[in-house]
Amino acid sequence: MGNDNLKQSTRAKGEILLEMRGVMIEGESDDVWHQIVKGVDITLRRGEVLGLIGESGAGKSTLGIAAMGFARPGCRFNGGSVTFDGIDLLAATDEERRKLRGSRISYVAQSAAASFNPAHRLIDQTIETATQHGIRDTSSAVADAKDLYGRLRLPNPTTIGSRYPHQVSGGQLQRVMTAMAMSCRPDLIIFDEPTTALDVTTQVEVLASIRAIVEEFNTAAIYITHDLAVVAQMAHRIMVLRHGKLVEEAPTREMLAEPKEAYTKSLWAVRKLAKEESTSPDLILKVDHIDAAYGNAVKILDDVSISVPRGRTVAVVGESGSGKSTLARVVTGLLPPSKGSVQFNGRDLPSALAQRDKESLRRIQMIYQSPDTALNPRHRVYDIIGRPLTFYHNLRGKALEARIIDLLKMIELDETYIDRLPGELSGGQKQRICIARALAAEPDLIICDEVTSALDQIVQEEILKLLLRLQAEFDISYLFITHDIATVRAIADEIVVMNQGKVVQQGLKTKVLSPPHPAYTELLLSSVPEMDPDWLTNLLQKRAAKTK
């Protein structure tokens, strides 16, 4: 750990570390170049956290990656400069930039699942950068990684590194990636939606850990997020981007108290959607006393019973590892339960996917959390939506194309999208395509697994309104897995609260969200970030006082 003390002593808080001047980046689509970032300036000092917010397609992630002197595939710099600690990154050689990345500049990506090699253990991937750059030998790197796992509140920090990526939850994987980025104690970290996959209780712990480590080592950070309440806890300054341009910039408290631009005010005003709850005695899905585990491992679901009324939405909430996604896997047949049954439309479903007939498969569809990993990057929209139409409804030729166009209109996209690849779509557009693919089967039940968590707040609201409209129009039932309480208020009729594989509370939305709450539900609700820069500090102080 001697390197840490040396690096810390040479870091004078407040010194300019990163200067980006007039940065312009363009991207190619259909052999035509168009501007993505349009002349943005950034000055970042050591120990400072800059928040970048804006809707999908604003250029936030492109600008964050540009801070490393890098343009993503299909993009290029066409103006401006990027200077890191006196080094002109755009003039530097590839080798010079490679030496900086990972050791002095780190990046925490939004999609942890797509960022890990599935064939290597977590600990080996965590220490790779530190050992390759000669910052630590293997034994000290392993010890430091375990220390970081503990700081980031990962379970069993001394042993979790021996697992493979698929053996931990999405939230746990995101924290391992944060530990990986911090392993070299870099001067600058770009956090690109690092808490997107985290439940609210875990998010509190991770935000507190990130903030503490950034402060301890005078690390500068660019924090990219669509969650305004989160950025309020992390950033000293906030920049609002739209269509690749700077809309507004101010210290965090000033920005929250009095945003000046109409667009910024619109961001502050979103997410007020609230569905009036209703229920029905007609059940489409009944999960009855289910136990489930992976292999011979510890039980993941323990005597779980839930029901979904026809044409209604049941939200399943709980922290990372509570069993929410495992429940979805049991319902879809991807994970046969060890005990209990799943009934659909009053009939027992075969427990394994391979045993279910085509009609059973058609009636239950799933929309996944990350459209980036759920869509084949080499398949065009025509193929993505067309495949279930051909498989379930035997559509081909002109009838197939006409139905694809109908589905595109249903999700509020036009026929010009039919030949696009996923890489040519924004995050919100990709998720709409995933919704259209599920709708193509004409299902009775759609399982939505964190389908809005990766989207900015404006697009989240659009997607939720779309799902509500489709439900009203086609009487679709939703099993909606989420960690976002605002989303629950917007879309749910009933709520199921899960903790450590068990159902701890369930009922109509107003009943579950109204006090008094069971202890675990209270913990979840108290962990929802608020638009107050002091919220995280105050919450941590309250919880610390309770443990004394």
Image: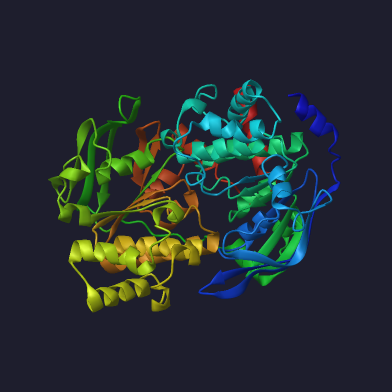
Residue 431 sits in quarter: bottom left
Of the pair 310 and 398, the residue shown nearer to us: 398
Does 70 sit left or right of 452 as displayed? right
- Residue at left 62%, top 24%? 138
Could you say where residue 252 lies in the image, as x and y percent from the top left? 73, 54
Quadrant the C terminus occupies: top right
The answer to whether residue 425 shows anywhere in this view is: no
Residue 211 image-quadrant placement: top right
Is 131 on the left or on the right of 478, as rendered?
right
Viewer-closest of 65 and 471: 65
Please count the marks in the image: 0
Which residue occupies 45% across, 32% down? 164
Q: Position of residue 111 (x, y in %)?
A: 51, 48
Which of the 4 image quadrants contains residue 135? top right
Answer above or below: position of 414 versus 6: below
Instruction: Pick the residue in front: 100 or 531.
Output: 100
Determine whether 429 is above or below 401 in the image.
Answer: above
**For the point 39% across and 52% down, which residue is it?**
368
Q: How is the image coloured?
A: rainbow
Residue 175 locus on image (x, y percent): 56, 37
Q: Where is the N terminus found, in terms of image quarters?
A: top right
Residue 509 visible, this orientation: yes
Residue 210 located left or right of residue 319? right
Q: Position of residue 9 (x, y in %)?
A: 85, 32
